[in-house]
Image: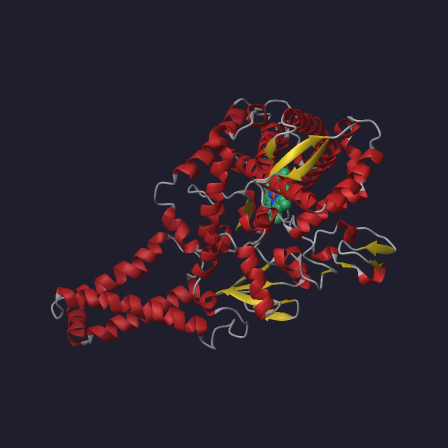
Amino acid sequence: MTRRILRNVFDRADPTTAIGVAAAACYLLYHRYLYRAPRPVVHLVLLLLVPVALVSLFARRLSVIQQCSHVLIYWTIVAALTVLYRISPLHPLARYPGPLAAKLSKFYLANLIVKGRAHENIRALHRDYGDVVRIGPNELSFNRSDAIPTIYAEKTMPKGPYYITRQSLDGVVQIDGVSDFKEHARRSKPWAKAMNGTAIKTYQPIVSSTVAELIEQLDKRVGGEVNMSDWMNFYGFDLMGRVVFGREWGMLREARDVGDYCHTIDKCVIMLAWLSQVPWIYPIMQLLSPPAEVNKMKEMGDNSCIARIDSGGSGTKDLYYYLMNEDGSSKSQLTRKEGLSDGVVAIIAGSDTAATALTHLCYYFLQRPECLRRLRHEIEEVYPSLGDELEDLARQADMLYLNACLNETLRLLPPVLTGLQRSVEDGTGGAMIAGYFVPEGTEVSVHHYSVQRNPKEFSPLPDTFWPDRWLEQDTYVLPTGGAIDRAQVHTNRNAFMPFSVGLQQCAGKNLALLELRAVACALFRRFDMTPSEKSNLENYERGLMDVYVTVKGPLYVHLTARQL
Ligand code: HEM
């Protein structure tokens, strides 16, 4: 009976109209419910099974070629409706300006990522279009410090679909991809314990001995040419291996990228940053076998974590000791899979970012040697005896000029340049951000590379390395010459967010600052640096790739030992 009715309907219905109605329904489903990275099976059903099944119902009236062309019509209608709606005045973000290509598709941002220039491109968009720019069909970028608390600190906006790449095939999410606030609170508890004052004190001897090894190696290379970018990577990696698991990578000792891990991580982050911009592709990619680099990165972390978990703990108070609750002092416990996943995060999040910040610091001192001389003066004042700066790291937290130099480096070139996407959740009715109404279902972020160079937040000379802006003084001498008084210097600390802000900010900030200060004090006290013939300082910034974290090029210098 039903079959007969259906046959009657399909005998009378116009195939093109039927396919058009089905395509419109498919579009509405995607638009209303499925725009956030659905499972591959949903694409398969809606984009393949539905049109193929539909044309097969008309098989008696359509030739094979006509059937194929009707499937094509279906796809074209879905695509056309998507495009038209995105650029129409009916779209909830229609009032926000931005390039046409960005309004049409996330491939616009993905393309910027592949080229590595997203940080500069988005800044240019803010210059052209204003403080709030539509950088994706459903995405806004803010270049305003008053957007920071609402987006990051008020616990109302969870992480956006960008973070889908933090999810593994078996459903475990790395801590930096956990969007539910309650679940995040559970996952971050062990991190808080691993980064409190007591834990940090236990890491200090490890930091000191790793810095000492770096210095020893650089000492052997005095008079020659040294790629500081490589050496900072070796340091960052070795330190994280030791602090996190007590593991020896031996990069400083062997003066090379042992296991090719630094290089592998760079390749992985480029791939993941691209995929994060088009999150609907990620579940499809997960069905394929992962690229060799991803396997290698996973293997590197897993090898260290599995050995540690299986041995029942080492008893050494390193980061993993706290993370895995090896002393049993905490009620909440990460599962084995969560422990594996966060162990890899610790290595990657901690090694690469710190190495990048230190290389940038060297770059700025090459540009402004007078700043280096002033820092050295402060180091020698705080540590009159050589060697103390390696023994007593606690004093470094209060070194005003040192911290001003680090802030200035992290302001101009934060190691995480673009990203930190959050969502205005469905069902909230939208949100007011910095005086702008943002409808629900919108992804938002503050572009910290832009906001940290915004003249309304940092002036004068927002693009110049000028550590003095972080100091409280009555008068300031400008790097361009001339003096200005305090009222003319504007430094908005609330616009400074290299570690992000709020509950989901960098879990390793305290350790990061400890290691940055330690290297700066020991390195610049002992060595002078000049750019080598191979290094073209003007091209250094142009060579940086913004792939969420920064992939940096070489920084060649000549090292000279100072008379101490
Ligand atoms: C200069 C060095 C560093 C910088 C600039 C930095 C920056 C950041 C930023 C911006 C985030 C927020 C990411 C997001 O919301 O998408 C983050 C998260 C994180 N960082 Fe760092 N980081 C640094 C060093 C470290 C170190 C040394 C560790 C520790 C091993 C670490 C561990 C983490 C973890 C676990 C998260 C995720 C936190 C969460 O989602 O709760 N970072 N970092």
Image coordinates of residue 412 in percent, x first then y, are 66, 52
Image coordinates of residue 392 in percent, x first then y, are 78, 29
Residue located 56% across and 67% down the image: 133
Q: How is the image coloured?
A: secondary structure
Residue located 46% across and 35% down the image: 298
Relative side of 456 to 143, left or right: right
Image coordinates of residue 520 in percent, x first then y, are 71, 36
Give the quadrant of the N terminus: bottom left
Relative side of 303 to 505, left or right: left
Residue located 19% across and 74% down the image: 9
19 and 411: which one is in front?
411
Image coordinates of residue 458 in percent, x first then y, are 72, 59
The image quadrant that residue 536 belongs to is top right
Residue located 25% across and 64% down the image: 51
In which quadrant of this rendering is ligand 1 seen? top right
Give the quadrant of the C terminus: top right
Relative side of 122 to 208, left or right: left
**Relative height, residue 227 to residue 48 (above, below):** above
288 and 353: which one is in front?
353
